[in-house]
Image (tube, rainbow, N blue to C red):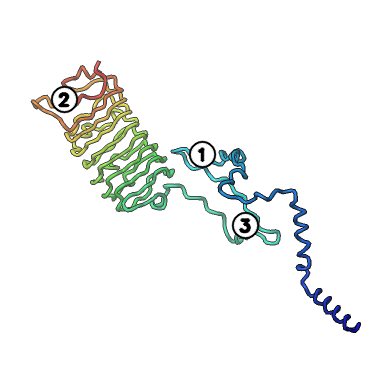
């Protein structure tokens, strides 16, 4: 072949070689470089299986690396949830940049009015929780009884600051069956505050400052005025005689010095413990003129915590199915 022919063949081979991509040309050199980097590692047994996983990773002291005890929230039964700490806004969320001013209220806007005082002229359903015929006002810092819906049957206004109960508070509420004003500061009740409630069955006024009892409706079944300041002079004469449906009368922890009589035959439980009762009339519980009388309904009488010696008045409770609780010596 002529020299020009050999020259053409050589040019063709060189052109084919340069047409191959650069990364293919370097393929031969790359494994050598990688082997140089990892030549100090023993990769012969690198395959991980369930059998050798524990040998490769040492997890014996893994729990010592992180102590999670301080992350466990301490919650005690009966306590309120702690108030959340003030959180700083994240960048871009709630923060304004230097070029974006915060929105300002219009200049015509006046000062913000103060929050209304609870119980001052507002309807109960604005201050409390109204569900059906029940109104729940517990622990709402009430200073007086708010206006109630006309169909209210159950009122719960415990743990507040109520100091007085007026007749107007329950005017027209003929469907009321239960009033619970426990743990307030009530020191005054109008004489006819409850008398005009024909369906009232439960009146609960414990842990207040009452010095006397008002007139009571004849429909009453349960009266609880424990832990007040009621003296015997604060009870109307024969205050409970006409309460023919009364079953539970709780007058403990007051300042009574005698048992209020007569007591209705319907009475089942009488609590008079922790008063100043020293004596008892012979017909306090039993009628002396009725032979063989057994007053079966009255099974629970508490007179403990009084200076009276019950053994001196055995005839006063001879008709009872159970002896009163108290001191017999």
Residue at 17% in and 27% down: 321
Q: Secondary structure at mark 1?
A: loop
Image quadrant where residue 60 sits: top right
* Residue 230 percent across, percent down from the top left: 32, 30
Disc on res. 74: 1
Residue at 58% in and 44% down: 54
Foreground mark, 2 or 3, reads 3
112 or 265: which is nearer to us? Answer: 265
CA separation in Å, label 1 and label 2: 59 Å
- List the residue tagged with mark 2: 283
Disc on res. 93: 3
Identify the image quadrant of the N terminus.
bottom right
Left or right of 255: which side holds 60?
A: right
Of marks 1 and 2, which one's residue comes earlier in the chain?
1
Left or right of 303: which side holds 32?
A: right
Residue at 27% in and 31% down: 235
Residue found farthest to the top: 329
In the rendered image of this protein, does residue 183 appear above or below residue 198? above
In the rendered image of this protein, does residue 238 appear above or below residue 175? above
Q: Secondary structure at mark 3?
A: loop
Image quadrant where residue 228 sits: top left
* Residue 287 percent across, percent down from the top left: 13, 27
CA separation in Å, label 2 and label 3: 80 Å
Q: Secondary structure at mark 2?
A: loop
* Residue 203 percent across, percent down from the top left: 29, 40
Residue at 22% in and 31% down: 237
Left or right of 249: which side holds 130?
A: right
34 or 245: which is nearer to us? Answer: 34
Residue found farthest to the left: 291
């Amino acid at each position: 072949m002529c020299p020009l022919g050999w020259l053409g063949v050589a040019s063709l081979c060189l052109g084919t070689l340069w047409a191959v991509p650069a990364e293919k040309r370097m393929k031969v050199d790359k494994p050598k470089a990688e082997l140089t980097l990892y030549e100090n590692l023993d990769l012969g047994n690198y395959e991980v299986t369930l059998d050798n996983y524990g040998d490769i990773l040492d997890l014996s002291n893994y729990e010592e690396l992180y102590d999670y005890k301080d992350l466990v929230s301490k919650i005690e039964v009966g306590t309120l949830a702690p108030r959340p700490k003030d959180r700083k806004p994240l960048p871009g969320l709630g923060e304004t940049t230097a070029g974006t001013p915060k929105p300002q209220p219009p200049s015509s806007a006046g000062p913000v009015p103060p929050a209304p005082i609870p119980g001052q002229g507002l309807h109960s359903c604005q201050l409390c929780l109204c569900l059906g015929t029940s109104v729940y006002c517990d622990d709402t810092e009430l200073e007086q009884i708010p206006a109630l819906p006309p169909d209210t049957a159950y009122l719960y206004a415990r743990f507040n600051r109520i100091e007085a109960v007026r007749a107007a508070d329950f005017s027209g509420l003929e469907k009321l069956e239960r009033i619970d004003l426990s743990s307030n500061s009530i020191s005054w009740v109008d004489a006819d505050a409850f008398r005009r409630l024909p369906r009232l069955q439960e009146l609960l006024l414990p842990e207040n400052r009452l010095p006397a009892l008002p007139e009571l409706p004849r429909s009453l079944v349960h009266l609880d005025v424990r832990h007040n300041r009621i003296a015997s002079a604060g009870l109307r004469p024969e205050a409970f005689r006409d309460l023919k449906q009364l079953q539970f009368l709780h007058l403990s922890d007051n300042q009574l010095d005698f048992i209020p009589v007569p007591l209705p035959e319907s009475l089942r439980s009488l609590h008079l413990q922790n008063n100043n009762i020293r004596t008892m009339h012979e017909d306090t519980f039993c009628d002396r003129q009725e032979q063989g009388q057994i007053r079966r309904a009255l099974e629970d009488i508490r007179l403990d915590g009084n200076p009276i010696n019950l053994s001196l008045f055995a005839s006063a409770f001879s008709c009872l199915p159970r002896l009163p609780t108290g001191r017999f010596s």
